[in-house]
Amino acid sequence: MLDWLHQTLTSTVTHAVIGALMPIYDFLVDGSSRYHWIYVLSGLIIAAYAYRKHSTAMSFETTLLDKQVWLSKSAINDYIIVVVTPVLRLTVLSGLALNWKAVSATIVTVLESAGVSGLTHDANVMALGVALTVTLFLVDDFLRWYAHYTFHRIPELWEFHKVHHSAEVLNFATAERHHPVETIMTSSLLFLGYGAVNGIFIGLFGEKLTVTTVAGANVFLFAFNVCGGVLRHSPFWVSFGPRIEKWIISPAMHQIHHSNKPEHFDKNLGGALSVWDRMAGTLHIPRGREIEGFGIGEETQDFRSLQVIFLRPFTAAGSLLRKRFSRATDEQETQPAAHQASTHSITA
């Protein structure tokens, strides 16, 4: 018993330390991280060029060195969340993580049992590798949009997503300002998609296919991030122009998504591509700098407390669930013969 307890505590502490150091690893090494140093550097270069070219009211240097952006209570909370979330994911929440390799293996097994042979000619490997790379990028981007859309549309999930929208200023770390519940749910959906795509391709064409990557990231994701992706959560307003923004989410478009103006609520939910928003009717292409501030209205100031950030979503979502079930029970008792589906909408 004591040996088991010792091993458990040692393992937990080790994983906690690894989690705490993970933001540094993400910045220095992991190209799939949205604040990898290459993206930060390229983003700052793009912002400096854009500000000098368009002669904006705020200079690049003034915006970059704004203490409110980097040292405000909102920004400090961002930094804390960036550290706490991976610690929780590797310790108390580790059992909730979905293994994409297990999903892939299951699909391969199902295909094999159906008589599908995963063989392909060597001459087709490169073309199929490109197809796999493109498919993974599109599926990943769509699932990110769909998860985001769902967290905006379902009131109980919105309580958790409020954490992200409660940021009063945007800096590079705000990209990871998510409640751990949202992080686990979204990553599980992404891993499910990643495992499904890999499983289908392996089952159909074999294991020789490789994804084209740069710095460990899908080449298309790398291209998007190196072209200013990091500026989506930053103090810099950078627009690509309406022609490009019909297809690609610009930093300005995502800052519209964080705007505290009601007309901007629930707009521009996409990750890299704006086609999903265009299809869903949630696309908003800005005409000039339309934002005045960020947040979720009067409730924003409540989220300056870490206790509110981590605990209130549970109580608020629980309260909504109780009301939902209570209302459903009342409807069944008063109208047992006719079920009336209720619809819900929220404002971000």
Image: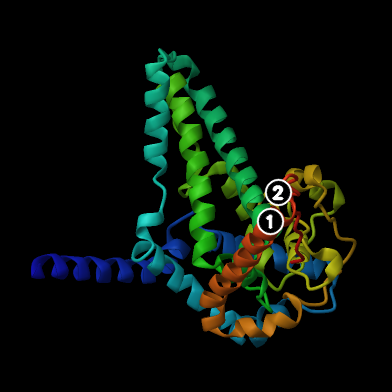
**Where the N terminus falls, by quadrant?**
bottom left
Q: Nearer the viewer, residue 252 or 186?
A: 186
**Relative to 256, is 331 above or below?**
above
Residue 276 image position (x, y, % from top left): 73, 44
Q: Nearer the viewer, residue 3 or 261?
A: 3
Residue 207 appears in the rendering: no
Is 84 situated left or right of 161 in this image?
Answer: left
**Where the C terminus falls, by quadrant?**
bottom right
Element type at mark 2: loop
Residue 283: give its label: none
Residue 333: give its label: 1
Residue 343 image position (x, y, % from top left): 76, 54
Q: How is the image coloured?
A: rainbow
**What residue is shown at x 75% (from left), y 58% (from top)?**
344
**What residue is shown at x 38% (from left), y 39% (from top)?**
101
Residue 261 image position (x, y, % from top left): 83, 71
Residue 172 image position (x, y, % from top left): 59, 69
Q: Are marks 1 and 2 in contact (CB under 8 Å)?
A: yes
Element type at mark 1: helix
Residue 336: give its label: 2
**What residue is shown at x 14% (from left), y 70% (from top)?**
6
Residue 116 location, quadrant: top left
**Relative to 169, is 223 above or below?**
above
Residue 177 appears in the rendering: yes
Is 263 situated left or right of 336 in this image?
Answer: right
Which amino acid is tagged 2? Pro
**Relative to 176, is 62 above or below?**
below
Which amino acid is tagged 1? Glu
Q: Nearer the viewer, residue 123 or 342?
A: 342
